[in-house]
Amino acid sequence: MTASLTIRGLVKEYKPGQPVLKGIDLEFDGAGLTAIIGASGTGKSTLIRCINRLVEPTAGEIIFAGEDIAKLRRGELRNARRRIGMVFQEYNLVERLSVMENLLTGRLGYTGAWQAWLRRFPAADIERSFALLETVGLASFADQRADSLSGGQRQRVGIARALMQEPRLMLADEPTSSLDPKTSVEIMTLLKEQGAAQGIPVIVNMHDVELSRRFADRIIGMKDGMVAFDGPPAELDHAMLKHIYGGEGWLH
Amino acid sequence: MNAVPREWHRYTSGQRLARFTFYFFIVAAVVASARTVEIIPEFLYDAPEQMKDLLTRMWPPEFRYYPDGIHDALIETIHIASLGTLLSIFIALPFGLLAARNLTPSPTLNYLAKLVLVSSRSVNSLVWALLFVGIFGPGALAGTLAIAFRSVGFVGKLVGEALEETPRGPIEALEAAGASTGQRVWYGYWPQIRPAFWSIVLLRWDINVRESAVLGLVGAGGIGMAMQAAIDLFQWERVAMILLSIFIIVIVAEIAVTALRKRIL
Amino acid sequence: MNVPAPRPFRVSTGARVGFLLLALYAFYAASQLDFTWDRFITGLDNGARFIGRMFPPNFSNWELLIKGLVESLQIAVLASLGGILISLPVSLLASRNLMPSWATWPARALIAVCRSLHPVIVAIFFVKAVGFGALAGILALVVASIGFIGKLFTEAIEEISLKQVEAVRATGASFANVILFGVLPQVFSRFVGFATYQTDSNLRSSTMVGIVGAGGIGGTLFAAFQRFDYDFVCAILLSIIALIMVGEMLANLIRAVFVEGLGFGSRDGKRPAPAVPSAAKEFD
């Protein structure tokens, strides 16, 4: 079972008259990791955040599982967000909470406030948390506070938190930009594996072209708020990279 | 997946026990207080109406009362706050020096100085005022001394802490040059704690302006005396005018302190 | 200041003028307030007799003393509970990073009003409104608590990391759950710090509001003063100081359990201790 995501005519203006996204049309179908690349300030992060409306789109449609997310009311939007996992550049864990509590955060969309306050989560959620901690290799860390972890460990918790949502779509906003090269590869491997295991599309913002070539099934190149390239990594040649990023000295 | 469902708790059992113990005591204290405190329910139900009545009688404040007794009392209040703060500096500094462990290497003296500072802070300024009214009779002198004695603990404690946080380097240099204790304090410590010192004094003056406004309620001078008199005579519009004056003077003091702190720091 | 060649250790002209003005002001103010040497000397005489009559403290009227202290405690407990329970939502409403301005504006105004009035003045009003007794004291200290906790807690909430909040929002959590998991963990230890500090402060104030008839030991103290019962005054003062010191110890213990995760059978909690709330200390 896969949910398709269709973006049509997506426009975002932070200031009126100065669009950051100038009409994006994209389709995501089935499993597979899509990397969005592009120079800083081209709206990669805005695009990803528009999909779950952490940033309000100015115009356009975002159709996910048959619903236009851009038009949902607050309650409906929350229900839609429950099905979209998100991983952040700076991990965005709740630092004062334990690793376990951070994972359980992924179930908050299904938990009443009183249960959440008392930390009374269903046994199945607890079981799933422990299982995911084993999956991401942090089985013995459940009771550690999130702020005592290293960067790579934090991002694993971030991924586990997103997976707790049993997402039908996974978004990742520069998940490796704050990590060293070795850890970056580990995190990308984990994202790719888990996306395949769940059979869901994974959309990742990246600035590292080599890393995106290595892991992505599809690459979207953005330039000036528009899609400049959309295709398999093999088709991304130097000419296209030069077009997306400008200049060429960095290519060698 | 394991066959046996794993359990997770936010706290260890010892932590939970400690928390429950405290929750229990808090609930017990609240229940015990609520059950035994002498509250007359009729008064409670009546309260909103009574408040409304009082406020309508106070509104609007009568400005023509201001020159008639309020202005002078307000100035007196500021004098009490300022003189009390100044006086407290002279009393507090020796104790602050004695309380600082790096400056006074005698634990006994540190302890005694701290005891004095703690006692000063434990007694409320209104209670200090009662004491000094008993000694010196009603009036601004009692108020000034009350403010001074209450402030000693505050200024002394914070100055002592500021002294203890001074970096050792410059002082060791002075010691190496053979400076006496007095020279070390004046040339080594004072320049380093000066900004902290003035900001402590200004902060206390700000608090003292608020406090000196109520000392008159026990006869220790200032605008509180004017307020007590107005309340006794049920002149509610006058009370409102006094409250408004206090409100304004408190805000002006806060603005002045913020501005001065910026210049000093 | 553009002093051409600053010599070390030289007191600047500005500072000299400042000190001179301060000294002049002190003399002027002292003369305005009619401070005279005679009055001071007479007072010292009085003071010696006063202190002589305070000792030894007289505890024979202990029933009255206990009754007053218990009432002060009741006032402090109930006022703290009320103040803490009210200031939590008020602070959330007043935080500009979480709420739209139609919510923050009235909440901030409420906090400002509560803060600007001295608790004793508020107590006078409640005495007029609800009559003499503990209720007036409780209400007055609730107002003071809202002012203090409300201001500092609002500032604490406005300093939180919004990234953590964003992550919780992205999971589809309800607003209440975002507050519970995204906001409160970041500020809870500071809230406990402010709340225990204010409870401690309420205990001190509860011994004083009785002076204006708002219940507690303060009324007993004031009456003893007016009867010149100075040995009883001394007994009351000693009891108040003892009560306040016990209160301070309890406040430290509460902080240890709730903030540092101290538990029975564990010498230290399993969580590292977060930074001690230091903003409250400044307020003495």
Image: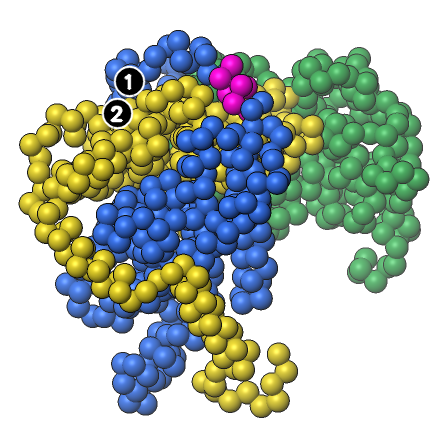
Chain colours: A green, B blue, C yellow
Badge 2: few (under 14), some or many (20 or more) residues near its Cα, within 10 Å? many
Three-letter amino acid code at the position of disc 1: Val
Labelled pair 1, 2 in contact (Cβ < 8 Å): yes
Q: Nearer the viewer, residue A232 or A49?
A: A49
Residue A124 left/right relative to A87: left
Q: Which residues are magenta?
A: B49-55
Amino acid identity at mark 2: Glu
Distance from the alpha carbon under mark 1 to that under mark 2 = 7 Å
Name the residue located 16 percent from the left edge and 30 percent from the top edge.
Answer: C65
Residue found 71% across the figure and 14% down from its top = A76
Label 1 Cα crowd, 10 Å radius (few <14 / some 14-19 / many 20+): many
* Residue placed under numbered mark 1 in the picture: B37
| Residue C20 location (% of width, % of height) | 48, 76
**Residue A224 in picture, x, y percent from top left:** 89, 45
Whole-percent x and y of residue A230?
87, 36
The one of B52 and C73 positioned closer to us in this rendering? B52
Q: In which image quadrant can residue A191 be found?
A: top right
Residue B255 appears left or right of C208: right
For disc 2, the marked residue is C71
Secondary structure mainly formed by the magenta segment: helix
